[in-house]
Image: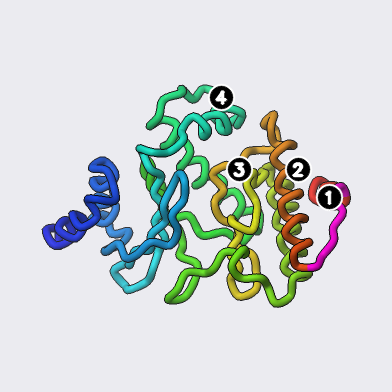
Amino acid sequence: MGKITREKFKTWGNVFDNFTLRNLFKLSSQGHFEEMKSPISIGKEANVFSAETEDGKLIAVKIYRLQNCDFNKMYDYIKYDARYVNLKAKRREIIFSWAQREFRNILKSREAGVRVPLPLQCTHNILLMEYIGDKEPAPKLKDAYPEDPKKFMDKTFDYMKKMYKAGLVHGDLSEFNILNWKDKPVFIDISQGTITRSINAEELLVRDIKNMCRFAKKMGLEYDKEEIKKMIKG
């Protein structure tokens, strides 16, 4: 089985660097998954793939690129997070901390009652999570408007409130980072999320609210941004 699995990973050699390939193989050998399947999303800083487990279930594998990512931008955000004040401005250390921060933020959000993918494992630049979807991955909100926009937005703002009450701000919330799964929101991509005592938390919260009110308007809904802010911080 080891040789077969290693051969399978060689087929991804033109996608991942050797360090990432070694760690993917290690995670596979530990039983987290058997085989990488197909891309779910391709982003500026990370790619997300589906992978199949031994029992035939799917998980999501998010891989932060060690090359060709704007780690300086990552550092500009994470340096304000009170949890990472001693972080050195070194590429790999920043990227590894960025992945770890997403893992911690997802776990914290889930504990607060927010629907997010269940975090499974974080190793260096690789994050394993629950796969949201059936055979096809759940669509992003930008590609699948809800049948009941008001109910969807009410739940979205409720999740934002729960995150804030738990001491966390998403920091990059928009229709690009919310899945519409069975007409209910699932928050994703929380690597930019920060704790509320960070000095840029208020700025990020205001931006999140602005983004969601803007998108709600596309669906014919009007919200007062200041009222939403009071509700979330209430």
Q: Circle 3 sits in a helix, a strand or a loop, which is it? A: loop
Residue at the image point whose x is 42% and y is 76% from the top: 135
Q: Name the front one of labels 2 and 3.
A: 2
Instruction: Tell whether position 86 is magenta.
Output: no
Looking at the rendered image, the quarter that the N terminus falls into is: bottom left
CA neighbours of label 3 inside 10 A, class few (<14), some (14 to 19), many (20+): many
Earlier residue among tags 2 and 4: 4
Residue 122 numbered tag: none
Earlier residue among tags 1 and 4: 4
- Which amino acid type corresponds to the residue marked 1 in the rendered image? Lys
Which residue is the site of mark 2? 206
Earlier residue among tags 2 and 1: 2
Would you say 143 lies left or right of 91 here? right
Instruction: Tell whether position 221 is magenta.
Output: yes
Earlier residue among tags 3 and 1: 3
Between 96 and 18, the one lying in front of the other is 18
Which residue is the site of mark 1? 225
State the separation of the CA atoms marked 2 and 1.
8 Å
Evaluate if marks 2 and 1 touch, with contact meaning CB atoms under 8 Å apart. yes
Residue 88: x %, y % from top left: 46, 22
Where are the magenta residues, as a range?
Answer: 220-226
Q: Circle 1 sits in a helix, a strand or a loop, which is it? A: helix
Which residue is the site of mark 4? 85
- Which amino acid type corresponds to the residue marked 4 in the rendered image? Val
State the separation of the CA atoms marked 3 and 1.
20 Å
